[in-house]
Image (spheres, grey):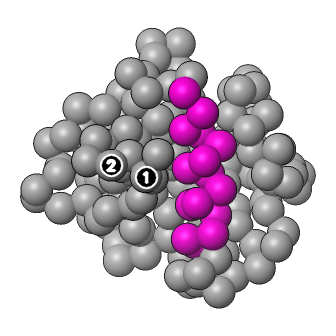
Amino acid sequence: MNIYFKKVTSENYKKVILLSVEESQRNFIESNEVSLEESKTGDHWRPVAIYNDNDIIGFAMYGYFHCEKRVWLDRLMIDKNHQGKGYGKIVLKLLINHIISEYKCDEIYLSILKDNVNAQRLYEEFNFRFNGELDISGEFIMVLKI
């Protein structure tokens, strides 16, 4: 396994927007196309394609919000054709380290729907904890204190 992140560019854009989650997961995360459009609203977002060797297996988007002074892991998805292969844990560990390295932060925030139990379980394995806050969409905020 050779997992790495690559900036989303015109070269990989179409492949990234074709990635999708299982039907039962679609209410939990925006499509990659919507996420990439959102990333154009400011320079704080960092959308990345997740690769295993030469294959795109997922997508993530993270960034630093100056007004909040918070680093957010806003999107993380593994394509439905690559789920169940252990990529989620490997990618999350690498992504956390990548974010810490880029921002020199001591906390990473994310938001989650309370009924997304599989994602919640994964995040809790990496010591993300609910902090009692809700985001502007009413999702529950989790924080990883490093």
Residue 97 placed where, x, y %? 63, 69
Q: So how many labels did they put on this image?
A: 2
Q: Is mark 2 on a helix, strand or loop?
A: loop
Q: In this view of the protein, which residue sits in the foreground, 137 or 30? A: 30
In this orientation, does residue 34 appear? no
- Asked whether the beta carbons under mark 2 and mark 1 sit within 8 Å of each other, the answer is yes
In this orientation, does residue 101 appear? yes
In the image: residue 29, left or right of residue 73? left
Identified at 56% across, 60% down, the residue is 95
In the image: residue 54, left or right of residue 81? left
Q: What element carries label 1?
A: loop
Residue under pointer 2: 53
Above-or-below relation of 48 to 140: below
Q: Which residue lies furthest to the left in this view?
A: 10
Residue under pointer 1: 2
Q: Indicate the amino acid at tag 2.
A: Asp
Quadrant assignment for the C terminus: bottom right
